[in-house]
Image (tube, helix red, strand yellow):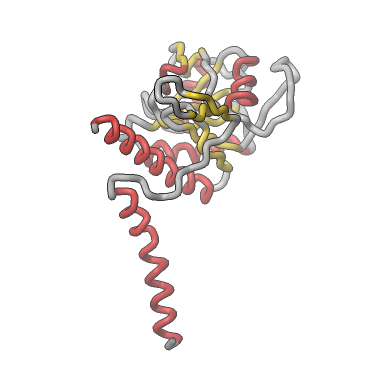
Amino acid sequence: MNPLLKKILIIGSILLLPSLFYLVLITGKNKVKPLEIYGPKEVSLNPETGKTDTVYHTIHPFRLIAHTGDSVTQELVRNKIFVTDFFFATCKSICPKMSNQLMRVQDKFAKNKNVLILSHSVDPQNDTPENLRQYSMKYRALKDKWYFLTGDKKQIYDLARHSYYLPVMDGDGGDHDFIHSEQFVLVDNHGRIRGFYDGTSRNEVDKLMEEIKVLLFEMKDEKSAEKK
C-alpha cells in the first residue's frame, strides 16, 4: 500500500473513532461493551419465573448531613447515577485536584438530573455543614447536583470500606482511623458499583465521563423496555 495512503487511512480512522462511538450510543440500544459490576454477587432462583437471578452488591443505606444542613439518605440517589469520593476540606495535597476534576464532571452533566455527585468528608469533626458550605462555594457546586456530606465518622468509614470497597486498611472509625483515597467511584441507578477512577488524573476522569454516558444509555434502554 502506498505509504501516504496508509497514513491518510490511519489518521482518518483515529478522527472517526469518537463519532462512531457516539453513533453507537445514539442508535437506541446500547451496543458498547457493558461496564463491569463490582463487588460480591449471589445467584438465586426466582420463584415467579423459575429462572436464576444474579443479585449484586449495592451501596448500603445511610443517613448523613449535607453542606446545606439538610439530612440526606439513600433516597437522594434512588434511581440516579452518581459519582462519589472521600476527602476533607483542609487537605492541601490530592483533595483540591480531585475537587477540580469533579467540577469538570459537574459541568459536563449540569443539565442532567439523573447524574449526581456525593463527596464524603473523612474529617467530620472539623468539616461541619457550614465549613463544607464554604468549601462548596469555592468549587461552585450546583444546587441539587453536588452534595458535600458529613456526619457520624464510623458510618462514613464503613461506607468507604464496605459499600464502596475503597482500597484502604481496616480500622474502627475511631479518632486515629483515617482514610485518604484518590479514587472516584461510579454507581449506577440500581446502586451497583460500575467503576473506579483516579480522581487526580484528567485522563481517568475523561474515561469516567464517557462511562457515565454509557450508564445513561443503559437507563434509556431500561425505560424503553418497560414501555413494551
Outermost residue, left side: 228
Q: Quadrant of the N terminus?
A: bottom left
Q: Is residue 113 left or right of residue 205?
A: left
Residue at (56, 42) in percent of width and height: 197
Residue at (61, 25) in percent of width and height: 160
Image position of 155 with respect to 204: above or below: above
Image position of 53 with respect to 182: above or below: above
Question: Residue 56 appears at what percent x and percent y?
Answer: 53, 28
Residue sitting nearer the eye, 158 or 23: 23
Q: Is residue 69 left or right of residue 177?
A: left
Residue at (59, 32) in percent of width and height: 39
Q: Quadrant of the C terminus?
A: top left
| Quarter where residue 152 is shown | top right
Residue 122 in view of the camera:
yes
Question: Residue 81 appears at what percent x and percent y?
Answer: 42, 31
Question: Residue 83 appears at what percent x and percent y?
Answer: 48, 33
Residue 89 in view of the camera:
no
Question: Residue 193 appears at what percent x and percent y?
Answer: 52, 33
| Quarter where residue 10 is shown | bottom left
Residue sitting nearer the eye, 61 or 144: 61
Outermost residue, bottom side: 2
